[in-house]
Image (cartoon, helix red, strand yellow):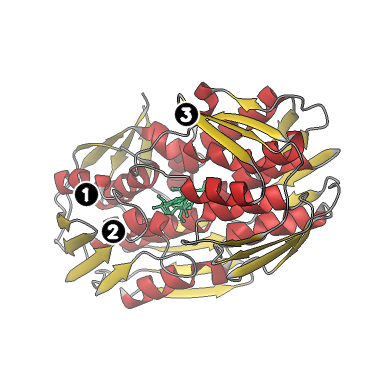
Amino acid sequence: MSRLLIEGAKKLSGEVEVQGAKNSALPILAATILCRGENILHNCSNLSDVDAAVKILRYLGGKVSRHDKTMLVNTDDIRRFDIPHGLMREMRSSIVFLGAVLSRNKRAKLSFPGGCELGPRPIDLHLKALRQMGAIIKEYHGILDCSAPKGLKGTKIALSFPSVGATENIMLAAVNASGTTTITNAAREPEICDLADFLNKCGAKIYGAGEGTIVIDGVDKLDSAQHTIISDRIVTSTLMSCAAITGSEIIIRGIVAEHLNSIISTFEEAGCKILCSKGSMYFQAPEKLRAVKSIRTMPYPGFPTDAQAPVMSALTVADGTTCFVENIFESRYKHVGELARLGANIKVEGKVAIVEGVDTLSGAFVEAQDLRGAAALVTAGLAAEGTTEVAGIKYLERGYENFEVVLSGLGATVKKI
Ligand code: EPZ
């Protein structure tokens, strides 16, 4: 299992280009199942989660080839409608294939996606919505056996929670359904808009993506399209956290400023100077960060749960106390114990984590247990005195492309062993 060795307490400097969004690439790869002909996807990051989605497309019969950051995907020869256990377990968000496979084949057989490091990952909202669209879903021995012999029908769906995955699955099931589907209390994340943009380029009729209500008029078939995936706002948030914790001044290129409003205001409150223009961000951290009174994770456009861990790392050395409330996932503080090994002072009570700023962190051996927790430990290691060894880098590689290379490019001393 690979590990990262970080020599900390070094400032970063220079410029970095941010990668394409993992959480946009995944649903768009699933969407290609509905498109005839060759799709060309640009800015598709080289990540193990993307590899897992490609494996599923190839298993189903799709042809996929990667040319650096561009992915060519042709799913004309797809004949299968089952996704085996091993492939489903590899990536929990494989559930987003359900809507597309069911819509294309009128059949879908997936194994129940397991829980993951963030706690149980229920899919009740996905299944309830698909049943409302006419799907017959049987659940036995951990298998989801779905069929829609008469095809899927458009209907009104009121989500009890603006679930990102459920919104994506409903969109994918609705684009070729008969009639109109209305989703109220839909997720508003930028990745939802990116998926809608791609599908509309293919001939879908999706209105209101990014708003609370999305309307989808079913069409007979979709063509293929060329699309550039949006930049990864969570990786950008992580790079901002790395610069903040090391008191650095860096430039981040290829960002979408309006996707980062809650992160920008958080770091401005912490004393950072941030200027954004034409897709670039100038980020200058103070010698000592100020604590941010409270950070509550919320559905977009609120503070993103995925940024909670790296931003928490940055604030472990701030002057004062920050109160985090994790409202989205029930166990997303696994990085806290490991940050404590580096000298952080954090108390967790249920959804609340109280971070008392300390003067400095000191290097230690730490172990990542989930994707954003891994990013948090690397962020902390950049500031810790001495050497920090981060194990469990396979989690980091799910969502960060060559992160040790990216950080070395900013002057950090990071080595993969
Ligand atoms: C997506 O996960 C992202 N993953 C997550 O990013 C992100 O943290 C999350 O959205 C929230 O923004 C991808 O896009 C691949 P949800 P998803 O459905 O779709 C509960 C990362 O680090 N829920 O919005 O699974 C659920 O348990 C990953 O890149 C139900 O109860 O998120 C959770 O508490 C981690 N029933 C909350 O809603 C359901 O049917 C948010 O889940 C579905 C979800």
Q: Which mark is residue 327?
A: none
- Residue 264: x and y in percent read 43, 71
Q: So how many labels did they put on this image?
A: 3
Q: Nearer the viewer, residue 79 or 288?
A: 79
Residue 20 in view of the camera? no
Which image quarter holds the N terminus? top left
Find numbered disc 1 in the image and state the secondary structure of the residue it sits on: helix
The kind of residue on which mark 3 rests is: Arg
Image spot of residue 173 (x, y percent): 68, 48
Figure check: 369 above or below 272:
above
Residue at 37% over, 57% down: 328
Which residue is disc 2 drawn over?
312
On screen, residue 352 versus residue 196, left or right, reads left
Residue 246 falls in which quadrant of the image?
A: bottom left
Q: Position of residue 400 (x, y in %)?
A: 48, 43
Location of mark 3 (residue) = 89
Crowd around label 1: few <14 · some 14–19 · many ≥20 (10 Å): many
Identify which residue, 413 or 43, lies in the foreground: 43
Q: Of marks 1 and 3, which one's residue comes earlier in the chain?
A: 3
Pair 1/3: label in front: 3
- The three-letter amino acid code for the residue at tag 2 is Met
Give 160 or 266, whichever is nearer the viewer. Answer: 160
Local crowd at mark 3 within 10 Å, few (<14), some, or many (≥20)? some
Residue that carries the numbered disc 1 in the rendered image: 336
In the rendered view, tell whether residue 190 sits above or below residue 395.
below
How crowded is the residue under tag 2: few (<14 C-alpha within 10 Å), some, or many (20+)?
many
In the image, residue 145 above or below residue 318: above
